[in-house]
Amino acid sequence: MFPCAHLFRCFHHFLFLSLSDVDECSDRSDEDLLCDHYCHNYIGGYYCSCRYGYLLHTDNHTCRVECSDSVFRERSGVLSSVDFPAPYPKSSDCSYGIEVEPGFKLRLQFDPSFDIEDHPDARCPYDYIKITGGSTEFGPFCGDKSPGVIETESNVITVVFHSDNSGENLGWRMTYTVIGSQCPVPEIPSNALINPIQSDYSFKDYIVFTCKPGYKLLKDAQYLDHFQVDCGSDGSWSSRPPQCHTVDCGSPKVVDMADVVFGNHDNSTLFGSNFTYICREGTFDPSNRNTSYTCGQNGEWTNSEAGIKLPNCLLACGHPSRTLPAQVKRIVGGRSAEPGLFPWHVLLSVEDQSRVPEDRWFGSGVLLSESWVLTAAHVLRSQRRDASVVPVAPEHVKVYFGLHDTRDKHQAVSRSVDEVILHPDFQPNNYNNDIALLRLSERVEFNNVTRPVCLPSPDNKPDHSSPPPNSLGVVAGWGISNLNASSSSLTSNPTLMADPGVTSDLLQYVKLPVVSQDECRASYASRSITYNITDNMFCAGFFEGGRDTCLGDSGGAFVMENQVIRRWVVFGLVSWGGPEECGSQRVYGVYTRVAKYVEWIQEHV
């Protein structure tokens, strides 16, 4: 098999060859063959590859990028060549779009560090960046001088960057921002405030208008807390500025029984104006605070102590405008009352054809409020053949207020009546529950001679709701002044006679002591067992006589002054008396005990 019989003898006949491969990736003698990124050698040759994100060019050694799908829509941003500030890729064409909403203009700011391959004799023949906005083109730019600031007039631009297959340049970077269409600086309306305050305003800026304290924003006939206008894409504001009008608190709220007195001559209700609530005659404000209100910046009338809370003018019950003299004579032949001494005392004029066909009759009553009068039921009962308890028709009753002389009725304040309410348990045979209410057709105004009386506490409360024996009360009326006349007995009508010699034209009054219930009952039991003094009644008068109420005083008030609160309280109503002459010995007047009926009264009043 071998040409030589002995291997070692023939060894010198062989030729030994050795091959050595060229490493192209290390040999840089031919620069055109170098790879941009990675070079891979193999026996007999090499190949190139690129970093992630790059593509190998068709020349098989250049690494390029795909960068033509980016569109920026934010109002600010940064664009740069790939890998800036490292050298940018070769053989690449990048197109960037920037689109912002109409009304904005794009502003470009290139960094000072700028390096794009150029040529000394030609304008950017190799690499360049070019910007197009609308019909305007900026560039091409190359070299090492930054383009600086470029103000476009468009909201849409295209940035194109081209590089050839040679060069090692660092590239570029730019920041873009937007400039809105400019709106004129608005004139600030009188007494208005704006926010924000700027030297200029552009698209998408806004201004919020408010008013100074004491003024209110008015826009399109509507009052607003604030109003916003926006700078539009065309450089105009979305609306005209609003106006600031002085705050108007409007007319003060009505407070019952109070008058409004303004602190200015023109009764202005604008910001800073003031007024005072003044409780009318016969009323008072229990808070005892000042009642002045000022128009505030929020459009409300406010009080320095109570805020927006209104005063409460209450009926100043039991406060006569005159002081009662210490010495008082009897009504029968007694002393005339000065006007205003008994401002709660009223005259009732009743006309009922079914009861007194030939005449009308009079009685007394007591004013409880602007709309209600208290009196005795028998004064308002219509006489019927069957002795039924039927009230007279309201239209047959007239009430006179502040009256001193009955001859002046035609000049006195009067009211008709809407409703007559007799106590449902009134018994005409013995005058038990002899009490009634009148509701006036129109409220009466209080003054020095017309004021309400106070009611006592209900009889079921442990206080001075019932007058103790021997305590003095006062009764007023126009009753018979002739000592020989008979009092209003159970068998007579409470009629005020028209004869001046029999009745008093002037209001009379008398002080009478309360009689114990035992003495009262004993007095009438001695006359007849038909006289029934119930717990709903009490007696007042002197054992020796001489002072008494009389015919025509029916329904009038038996009042006593509460020494604690210094007010006059109605404890009784003139009801009836014996058949003897008025002022006779041991003939006491009988009164309805009002404390027994306070709750019934309050149910209606």
Image: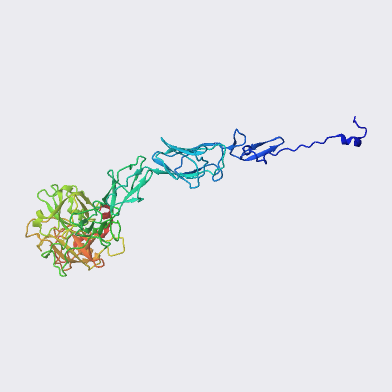
For the question of whether residue 42 can be seen, the reply is: yes
Seen in the picture, residue 71 relative to 525 is either above or below; the reply is above
Considering every residue shown, the one lying at the far bottom of the view is: 326
Q: Quadrant of the N terminus?
A: top right
- Indicate the position of residue 554 as horizontal and vertical percent values: 17, 57
The picture quadrant where one finds residue 12 is top right
- Indicate the position of residue 61 as horizontal and vertical percent values: 62, 36
Between 58 and 99, the one nearer to me in the picture: 58
285 left or right, relative to 13: left
How many numbered tags mark residues here? 0
52 left or right, relative to 265: right
Between 109 and 456, the one nearer to me in the picture: 109
Considering every residue shown, the one lying at the far front of the view is: 121
- Indicate the position of residue 382 as horizontal and vertical percent values: 17, 49
Between 32 and 487, the one nearer to me in the picture: 32
62 left or right, relative to 283: right
The picture quadrant where one finds residue 369 is bottom left
Seen in the picture, residue 30 relative to 414 is either above or below; the reply is above
Considering every residue shown, the one lying at the far top of the view is: 1
240 left or right, relative to 551: right
Between 320 and 349, the one nearer to me in the picture: 320
Colouring used for the render: rainbow
- Indicate the position of residue 209 as horizontal and vertical percent values: 32, 49
For the question of whether residue 536 can be seen, the reply is: no
